[in-house]
Amino acid sequence: MPSILQITLLAIIQGLAELLPVSSSAHVILAEKLMGLDPTSPPMTLLLVMLHTGTMFAVIFYFWGDWKKNYFQSSDRAATFAKQLFLATVMTGAVGLVLKELIEKVLLRETPKAEVEMLFGNLGMISAALAVAGLLILYASTKRSNRRDLGLGSRESVWIGLVQGLCLPFRGFSRSGATISVGLILGLAKSKSEEFSFALAVVLTPAVLAREIHRLLKAQAATSGESLAHLFTPGLLGMTLSFIAGLVALKWLSSWLEQGRWKWFGIYCLAFSVVVWFLR
């Protein structure tokens, strides 16, 4: 298990990078490798998801006022918002499950007890995913919103959900970067793209956390190793620290998005993909 210092560093990296469109997973996994930790092990994948949970609470805290004002003032608006979240989440789940089966049954077919998490430590794949995310962000930054203050429709929700599903197995393909960029490409206002992207993160995180807890419990039962309390405690510490760092990152992201600096995140992803490639 990682030390308190390692958890602190990972939580700060996660909190800052998760809510910026630069792929927190790529940064955390690279940091884990440099620290000599195994990012594919159940305790480490659970730690990563719990760090995501900390940033999820930061998202709720930061956006709650806007969500309440824009979507929860009436039952009709709340129902419409819930419908769009449901559509996007169903698309994400469908794509994610298909990719999981393809990866485990085809790409890793010769690997005993193959799991999609085995790809999480592949720096070559992370580098490629970062490059794709960077190019998508750069393309989106050239688009001008022509639907300011209009609610997103089913078409936009479906496309955003589909792209979010592509992000799930590929560390480096920034979820926030991809979903916000797709919203911008489809013509949504910057604020609407950002709000919807992070609302989706709040919906998605509990399901991913439940999967990783189940995976950890299976591994723990098979090895009869560390106690559950000892396995979860690092994650709780990291979750608290990533919450604090996440609030800082959200203020930064909102400011740069509104000031038209979205392209700089794409440039960073491309540069970081080169760094990861040479460190693989």
Image (tube, grey):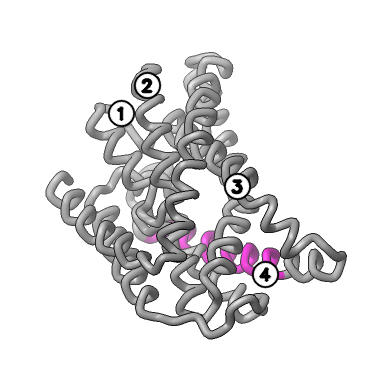
Instruction: Say which amino acid is labelled 3.
Output: Tyr
Magenta-colored stretch includes residue 49: no
Q: Is residue 46 above or below residue 230?
A: below
CB-based contact (under 8 Å), mark 3 and mark 2: no
* Of callouts 2 and 1, the N-terminal one: 2
Labelled disc at residue 62? 3
Instruction: Look at label 1 and name its amino acid.
Output: Leu
The residue at the point 45 percent across, 79 percent down is: 185
Left or right of 125, for residue 233: right
Q: CA distance from mark 2 to mark 1?
A: 7 Å
Give yes or no for contact between labels 4 and 1 (Cβ–Cβ under 8 Å): no
- Of the two numbered discs 4 and 1 on the same chain, state the one appearing first in sequence: 1
Categorize mark 4 by other alpha carbons within 10 Å: few (<14), some (14-19), many (20+): some
Q: Which corner quadrant holds the N terminus?
A: top left
Q: Could you say whether the residue bearing mark 4 is in a helix, strand or loop? A: helix
Helix, strand or loop at mark 2: loop
Give the mark count: 4
Near-viewer residue (126 or 63): 63
Residues at circles 2 and 1 in contact by the CB criterion of under 8 Å:
yes
Q: CA distance from mark 2 to mark 4?
A: 38 Å
Residue 153 picture location, percent across and down: 66, 79
Q: Residue at x 69, y 52 (%)?
A: 65
Q: What segment is highlighted magenta in the picture?
A: 84-106
Q: Position of residue 198 (x, y in %)?
A: 57, 56
Tag 4: amino acid: Leu
Residue 87's tag is 4
Q: CA distance from mark 1 to mark 3?
A: 32 Å
Which residue carries the number 2 mark? 2
Discs 3/2, front = 3
- Measure how far apart labels 3 and 4 are at the Cα level: 24 Å
Mark 2: which amino acid? Pro
